Image (cartoon, rainbow, N blue to C red):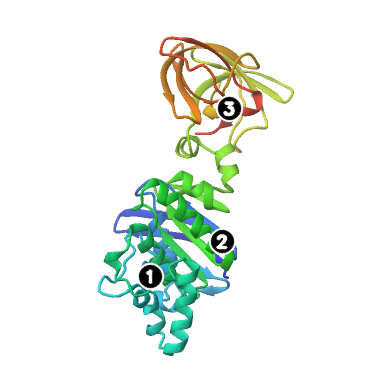
Amino acid sequence: MKVVKLDNVTKRFGKARGVENVDITIQPGEFFTFLGPSGCGKTTTLRMIAGFYFPSEGKVFFDNQDVTTMPPNKRNIGMVFQNYALFPHMTVFENIAFGLEVRKMSKAEIRKKVERAQAMVRLEQYGERKINELSGGQQQRVALARALVIEPSILLLDEPLSNLDAKLREETRLEIKRIQLELGVTTIYVTHDQTEAMAMSDRIMVMNNGVIQQVGAPEEIYNKPVNHFVASFIGEANVIDAAVEQTEGEMVTVKTADGLYLKGAAANASPNVAYRMGETIKLSIRPETVAEGEGPNQFTAEVQFVEFTGVSINYIVKVGETFFKVMIVNKGNKVLERGDQITLHIPERSIYFIGE
């Protein structure tokens, strides 16, 4: 297990910015995820850790060793690519063994390590099969076993589940997390899927346009987004503009453009928020925190859209010209229809004040 440190790393491609001033430290044994939309710089950052790209500025360290310009084959990393990069003319066993053969290990040692890796990913009976005889999920596990069999200090995974269907993706992410916990290997995972990142990670780095937006534990990223982008990108959120009306003790009252008064805790805010009378401020309110019935920050709205998922009833409601997303857990509740009136309230602790 190694510490991975990126010291103010920047990568440019000609005049185009790939990533800028990435400054993070990933702890030994940590499952750390780079999360963001396509083109945000997460894969570029991963490739600098792998050694496929060299930074334009800054340095990359494994523990205290500067590996900034070290070639990939000298870094003792295991990598799983989005397309798996398996050899179709080889069997499962041969694919997994490839990295060990390059290291010129004995046949006995190779067999021992490959069989252990096959067992780890639950492919013990598949050693003689060709890659085209496997399902997508099985191919993904072969790629994972090939990365792990060399006993890497760091495991890198670049969108490894994007080619799988939803159910298989969920099953496979549990397998990856199980193996990572079992081995304790420092793992860096790239994805644009918020659910994957939230379910698997010890910490998440959210990126946009090559710049870090926020780094933190999943619950911190979700419950305390630092800006509009993070609040909107991670899960669903109602992000609403309102003007500061009053500060009283530990509470802040704001007024939306439609005249709705909402009160929340002043401390429940990102670090860059300042409460100045009359100044516009943004509120982040998660749909699942908006409750049906009477309570604090109560209002009446008109149902515009209804989605019944079984687990929940999802509404889009309208107050004046403002739309709210609302998620009600299904407990046998009556499902309302478009045009119905609904009484809702927002607990004060559920309002989070964010910066731009």
Q: Secondary structure at mark 1?
A: loop
Amino acid type, label 1 = Tyr
The residue type indicated by label 2 comes to Ile
Residue at the spot x=47%, y=29% of the render?
310
Q: Which residue is mark 2?
A: 26
Q: Is residue 121 visible?
A: yes
Q: Is residue 155 left or right of residue 53?
A: right
* Quarter occupied by residue 43: bottom left
Q: How many marks?
A: 3
Q: Nearer the viewer, mark 1 or mark 2?
A: 1
Check the image and report above or below for 271 versus 329: below
Describe residue 64's horizontal placement relative to residue 248 as left or right: left
Report the residue at 46% width, 66% height from top: 122
SS of the residue at dot 2? strand
**Residue 202, horizontal then vertical, whole percent:** 58, 54
Residue 88 falls in image quadrant: bottom left
- 144 lies above or below 338: below
Dot 2 crowding, Cα within 10 Å, few <14, some 14–19, many 20+: many
The disc at residue 289 is 3
Q: Residue at x 42, y 88 (%)?
A: 107
- Position of the N terminus, as image quadrant, is bottom right
Residue 190 sits above or below residue 123 on the image? above
